[in-house]
Amino acid sequence: MQDIHDIHPPVDVGIDPVIFQAAAAAAALIILIVLAFFAYKRLTRRRKEGPKDQLLLPEPPPPFEQAMQAMKALDERPFTDLRLFYFELTAILKRYIGREYEARVPEMTSQEFGRFLSGLNLPRPVVDDLGQLMDASDHVKYAGSVPVRQMIEQDLSKGKGIIRGISEQLKSQIEEAHV
Protein backbone atom coordinates (compact mmCIF):
# COMPACT_ATOMS: atom_id res chain seq x y z
CA MET A 1 0.00 0.00 0.00
CA GLN A 2 2.99 2.20 -0.02
CA ASP A 3 2.79 2.87 -3.76
CA ILE A 4 -0.71 4.55 -3.65
CA HIS A 5 -0.50 8.34 -3.62
CA ASP A 6 -3.19 11.04 -3.29
CA ILE A 7 -4.49 12.69 -6.46
CA HIS A 8 -3.36 16.24 -6.94
CA PRO A 9 -6.06 18.98 -7.05
CA PRO A 10 -7.07 20.29 -10.50
CA VAL A 11 -4.78 22.88 -11.96
CA ASP A 12 -6.37 26.11 -13.30
CA VAL A 13 -5.56 26.58 -16.92
CA GLY A 14 -6.54 29.68 -18.90
CA ILE A 15 -8.91 32.42 -17.80
CA ASP A 16 -11.00 32.27 -14.64
CA PRO A 17 -14.77 31.68 -15.45
CA VAL A 18 -15.77 34.24 -12.82
CA ILE A 19 -14.42 36.94 -15.11
CA PHE A 20 -16.77 35.76 -17.92
CA GLN A 21 -19.72 35.72 -15.53
CA ALA A 22 -18.96 39.23 -14.31
CA ALA A 23 -18.60 40.50 -17.89
CA ALA A 24 -21.93 38.89 -18.92
CA ALA A 25 -23.69 40.40 -15.90
CA ALA A 26 -22.25 43.84 -16.67
CA ALA A 27 -23.32 43.59 -20.32
CA ALA A 28 -26.85 42.54 -19.30
CA LEU A 29 -27.04 45.44 -16.84
CA ILE A 30 -25.94 47.92 -19.51
CA ILE A 31 -28.53 46.55 -21.96
CA LEU A 32 -31.28 46.86 -19.33
CA ILE A 33 -30.27 50.44 -18.54
CA VAL A 34 -30.32 51.38 -22.25
CA LEU A 35 -33.75 49.74 -22.75
CA ALA A 36 -35.15 51.50 -19.68
CA PHE A 37 -33.82 54.84 -20.96
CA PHE A 38 -35.48 54.42 -24.37
CA ALA A 39 -38.75 53.25 -22.81
CA TYR A 40 -38.75 56.29 -20.52
CA LYS A 41 -38.09 58.65 -23.44
CA ARG A 42 -40.86 57.08 -25.49
CA LEU A 43 -43.41 57.29 -22.68
CA THR A 44 -42.59 60.91 -21.87
CA ARG A 45 -42.77 61.85 -25.56
CA ARG A 46 -46.26 60.30 -25.85
CA ARG A 47 -47.45 62.21 -22.80
CA LYS A 48 -46.19 65.48 -24.23
CA GLU A 49 -47.80 64.89 -27.62
CA GLY A 50 -51.13 63.92 -26.09
CA PRO A 51 -54.14 62.73 -28.05
CA LYS A 52 -53.59 65.01 -31.07
CA ASP A 53 -51.67 62.29 -32.91
CA GLN A 54 -54.41 59.72 -32.28
CA LEU A 55 -57.28 59.14 -34.64
CA LEU A 56 -60.45 60.14 -32.83
CA LEU A 57 -63.52 58.31 -34.03
CA PRO A 58 -66.94 59.84 -33.69
CA GLU A 59 -69.09 58.78 -30.78
CA PRO A 60 -71.32 55.87 -31.79
CA PRO A 61 -75.01 56.68 -31.91
CA PRO A 62 -77.16 55.63 -28.96
CA PRO A 63 -78.57 52.09 -29.01
CA PHE A 64 -82.08 53.37 -29.80
CA GLU A 65 -80.89 55.18 -32.93
CA GLN A 66 -78.79 52.22 -34.04
CA ALA A 67 -81.73 49.86 -33.62
CA MET A 68 -84.16 52.13 -35.47
CA GLN A 69 -81.66 52.58 -38.33
CA ALA A 70 -81.23 48.82 -38.56
CA MET A 71 -85.02 48.34 -38.55
CA LYS A 72 -85.39 50.92 -41.32
CA ALA A 73 -82.70 49.17 -43.39
CA LEU A 74 -84.45 45.83 -42.79
CA ASP A 75 -87.78 47.34 -43.82
CA GLU A 76 -86.31 48.75 -47.06
CA ARG A 77 -84.79 45.42 -48.07
CA PRO A 78 -86.90 43.07 -50.19
CA PHE A 79 -88.18 39.98 -48.37
CA THR A 80 -86.48 37.28 -50.42
CA ASP A 81 -85.34 34.95 -47.65
CA LEU A 82 -87.83 34.96 -44.79
CA ARG A 83 -85.62 32.97 -42.45
CA LEU A 84 -82.85 35.52 -42.90
CA PHE A 85 -85.34 38.34 -42.32
CA TYR A 86 -86.42 36.85 -38.98
CA PHE A 87 -82.84 36.09 -37.97
CA GLU A 88 -81.95 39.74 -38.57
CA LEU A 89 -85.09 41.03 -36.87
CA THR A 90 -84.42 39.09 -33.68
CA ALA A 91 -80.71 39.98 -33.83
CA ILE A 92 -81.58 43.69 -33.97
CA LEU A 93 -83.88 43.37 -30.97
CA LYS A 94 -81.41 41.30 -28.95
CA ARG A 95 -78.53 43.64 -29.81
CA TYR A 96 -80.60 46.67 -28.78
CA ILE A 97 -81.70 45.15 -25.48
CA GLY A 98 -78.19 43.89 -24.81
CA ARG A 99 -76.71 47.36 -25.31
CA GLU A 100 -79.37 49.12 -23.26
CA TYR A 101 -79.09 46.71 -20.33
CA GLU A 102 -75.39 45.94 -20.76
CA ALA A 103 -75.95 42.20 -21.02
CA ARG A 104 -74.82 39.49 -23.43
CA VAL A 105 -78.30 39.12 -24.87
CA PRO A 106 -77.28 38.33 -28.49
CA GLU A 107 -75.63 35.14 -27.27
CA MET A 108 -78.73 33.95 -25.40
CA THR A 109 -81.13 31.32 -26.66
CA SER A 110 -84.83 32.16 -26.81
CA GLN A 111 -85.45 30.46 -23.47
CA GLU A 112 -82.55 32.26 -21.78
CA PHE A 113 -83.74 35.50 -23.31
CA GLY A 114 -87.23 34.93 -21.90
CA ARG A 115 -85.83 34.37 -18.42
CA PHE A 116 -83.71 37.50 -18.79
CA LEU A 117 -86.77 39.55 -19.79
CA SER A 118 -88.72 38.38 -16.77
CA GLY A 119 -86.05 39.95 -14.56
CA LEU A 120 -86.39 43.35 -16.20
CA ASN A 121 -88.88 45.98 -15.14
CA LEU A 122 -90.59 46.30 -18.53
CA PRO A 123 -94.25 47.07 -19.18
CA ARG A 124 -96.34 43.93 -19.62
CA PRO A 125 -97.44 44.76 -23.21
CA VAL A 126 -93.81 45.12 -24.31
CA VAL A 127 -92.86 41.78 -22.73
CA ASP A 128 -95.90 40.08 -24.27
CA ASP A 129 -95.19 41.52 -27.73
CA LEU A 130 -91.55 40.54 -27.49
CA GLY A 131 -92.42 37.02 -26.39
CA GLN A 132 -94.92 36.60 -29.23
CA LEU A 133 -92.43 37.97 -31.75
CA MET A 134 -89.63 35.71 -30.54
CA ASP A 135 -91.95 32.69 -30.61
CA ALA A 136 -93.18 33.48 -34.13
CA SER A 137 -89.65 34.09 -35.36
CA ASP A 138 -88.48 30.78 -33.87
CA HIS A 139 -91.22 29.01 -35.83
CA VAL A 140 -90.01 30.63 -39.05
CA LYS A 141 -86.30 30.24 -38.33
CA TYR A 142 -86.27 26.68 -37.05
CA ALA A 143 -89.57 24.96 -37.84
CA GLY A 144 -89.87 26.06 -41.45
CA SER A 145 -93.13 27.95 -40.98
CA VAL A 146 -93.88 30.35 -43.84
CA PRO A 147 -95.47 33.62 -42.76
CA VAL A 148 -97.72 35.70 -44.99
CA ARG A 149 -96.70 39.17 -46.07
CA GLN A 150 -99.12 40.80 -43.62
CA MET A 151 -97.54 38.89 -40.70
CA ILE A 152 -94.07 40.01 -41.76
CA GLU A 153 -95.13 43.65 -41.78
CA GLN A 154 -96.86 43.25 -38.42
CA ASP A 155 -93.76 41.65 -36.91
CA LEU A 156 -91.58 44.45 -38.25
CA SER A 157 -93.87 47.15 -36.81
CA LYS A 158 -94.13 45.13 -33.57
CA GLY A 159 -90.31 45.11 -33.37
CA LYS A 160 -90.20 48.89 -33.79
CA GLY A 161 -92.87 49.23 -31.13
CA ILE A 162 -90.89 47.05 -28.75
CA ILE A 163 -87.81 49.22 -29.23
CA ARG A 164 -89.85 52.39 -28.64
CA GLY A 165 -91.51 50.87 -25.56
CA ILE A 166 -88.21 49.86 -24.00
CA SER A 167 -86.73 53.28 -24.78
CA GLU A 168 -89.67 55.06 -23.16
CA GLN A 169 -89.44 52.80 -20.12
CA LEU A 170 -85.74 53.54 -19.72
CA LYS A 171 -86.34 57.29 -20.07
CA SER A 172 -89.03 57.20 -17.39
CA GLN A 173 -86.72 55.21 -15.08
CA ILE A 174 -83.96 57.79 -15.59
CA GLU A 175 -86.39 60.65 -14.87
CA GLU A 176 -87.60 58.92 -11.70
CA ALA A 177 -84.03 58.41 -10.56
CA HIS A 178 -83.25 62.12 -10.97
CA VAL A 179 -86.31 63.22 -9.01
Image (cartoon, rainbow, N blue to C red):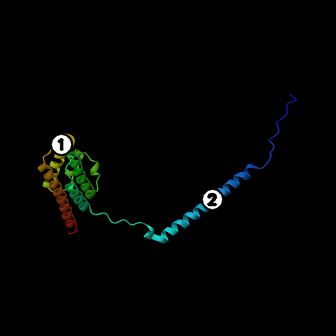
Question: Does the CB distance between marks 1 and 2 fall below 8 Å?
Answer: no
Report whether 5 appears left or right of 23. Answer: right
The residue closer to the viewer here, 145 or 7, is 145
Q: Label 1: how many residues lie within 10 Å, few (<14), some (14-19) or many (20+)?
A: some
Q: Is mark 1 on a helix, strand or loop?
A: helix
Which image quadrant for residue 170? bottom left
Percent x, y for residue 104? 29, 51
Q: Label 2: how many residues lie within 10 Å, few (<14), some (14-19) or many (20+)?
A: few
Residue at figure coordinates x 64%, y 60% from the top left: 30
Provide the residue designation for mark 2. 31
Percent x, y for residue 106? 27, 50
Kindly give the residue lying farthest to the right in the view shown.
2
Q: Can residue 84 be seen in this view?
A: yes
Kindly give the residue lying farthest to the bottom in the view shown.
48
The residue closer to the viewer here, 79 or 145, is 79
- Looking at the rendered image, the quarter that the C terminus falls into is bottom left
Q: Residue 113, which numbered label? A: none
- Looking at the rendered image, the quarter that the N terminus falls into is top right
Q: Residue 139, which numbered label? A: 1
Closer to viewer: mark 1 or mark 2: 1
Q: What element carries label 2?
A: helix
Residue at figure coordinates x 70%, y 55% from the top left: 23
Q: Distance between the residues labelled 1 and 2?
A: 67 Å
Percent x, y for residue 19? 73, 53
Q: What residue type is labelled 2?
A: Ile
Q: Is residue 122 visible?
A: no
Q: What residue type is labelled 1?
A: His
Q: Relative to residue 105, is residue 4 depicted above or below?
A: above
Residue at figure coordinates x 17%, y 57% from the top left: 160
Percent x, y for residue 10? 80, 41
Which image quadrant for residue 173? bottom left
Among the two numbered marks 1 and 2 on one chain, the one whose residue lies closer to the N terminus: 2
